[in-house]
Image (cartoon, rainbow, N blue to C red):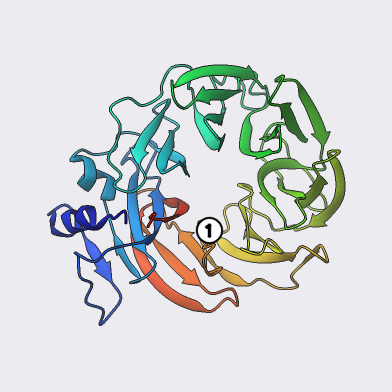
Amino acid sequence: MRKIRNFMFFVAVTATVFVSCKKDDDVDPSKEYSKVAYIVNYGSYSGSKSEISIYDTDSSSITHDAYKAANSVDFTSNIESMSIHDDIAYFMSNNGDKIDIVDAETLVASDNPISTDITKPRYFVADGNMAYISCWGDVNDWSVMANSYIAKIDLSTKVVTKIALPGGPEGVIIIGDKLYAALTTTKKIAVIDLSSNDISYINTLAIPYHFVVDDDGYLWASMVSTYTVPVGLDSVGLTQIDPTNNRVLTNVNFSSIGSNGFIHISSDKRTVYALGKEAWPGTASSIYSIDVPSQTLSSSALISGEKFNGFGVNPENDNIYVLISPGATENGSLKIYNSAGSLLDEEETGVSPKHIVFYNIEQ
């Protein structure tokens, strides 16, 4: 059985680490952990950099500064997103122009991050030994992003091949032999044939950002309005697409959807959750659900609060992990709700928690 016991013990006794637990819980640092949620604390772009908090889903306890504890150094960049593939974790370090590679179990970093032909990496997806990362490239005009691309990486050799894709690709997903990439400067989804690198496009009502796939194999994309490409509130929400012919099947209006377009799906893939945020400078936030079979938005918010910065859905039990960031220079918090919207736990995080990845240690 693979374990992270030794690492967690080291974290618990290191002076630089602060462990907080639920009241009346005495957590044994030598316990064998099997299920964790990694929380990416983005930090500040011009100040403190990213760090990782580890939430143990069995004991409901959280450990901070886990990257520093594992590597004895501070992380030196800001992590836009984190993905785990074949027990390796990949950090998209957007202002470091690199992809950091760490052991998913211990968080011990490789000495060789991928930095060649990587500029402003955003999101990662992989199929077998090939990975595809959306990269914004060198930006001269944020409304166009003419130099953006997909970085195709052979994970065994770390050789990077660039697939030019103007338009600022963000969320990426692979279905069959096609890569779907949301373009943030135009109302289109790019579809790349992975056997030929030929690109076609799906026209959308608003700006696409992120994807999930439902139990029928249909693709759902979040649709938002942005500062550079504003669209009407009647056009934003979610779009369902048939990937067999790339035709739009339906559009579900969600006028309060946040401009980051964060969406996640339940374990049975029959409920999509979407993050709603009040227009700036407002801070009211919410999470709504979309019923996949009926393609309808819930009549009221499942979860409401202030300053939601991201969220995730635990595939083990459909608990919803909400990340809250009061500002770019102070610690945030994690609130965990069940699928009915009842609060189960609340913990402090690092600065600007943004992204969460669930991981089960192999046994």
Relative side of 96 to 10, left or right:
right
Residue at 40 percent of width and 49 percent of height: 40
Residue at 20 percent of width and 38 percent of height: 73
Residue 64 vs 193, above or below: the answer is below
Q: Quadrant of residue 178?
A: top right
Relative side of 307 to 76, left or right:
right
Q: Secondary structure at mark 1?
A: strand
| x and y percentages locating residue 258 in the rendered image | 63, 53
Residue 126 or residue 78, whichever sits in front: 126
Residue at 61 percent of width and 51 percent of height: 262
Residue at 81 percent of width and 62 percent of height: 295
Pointer 1 local density, CA inside 10 Å: few below 14, some 14–19, many at least 20: many
| x and y percentages locating residue 44 in the rendered image | 37, 42
Total marks shown come to 1
Inspect this view and state whether residue 322 appears: yes
Location of the N terminus by quadrant is bottom left
Relative side of 136 to 110, left or right:
right
| x and y percentages locating residue 270 in the rendered image | 71, 64
Give the residue at mark 1.
312
Residue 227 or residue 83, whichever sits in front: 83
Query: Outermost residue, bottom direction?
Result: 24
Inspect this view and state whether residue 330 appears: no
| x and y percentages locating residue 75 in the rendered image | 29, 38
Relative side of 284 to 194, left or right:
left
Location of the C terminus by quadrant is bottom left
Residue 75 vs 309, above or below: the answer is above
Indicate the amino acid at tag 1: Gly
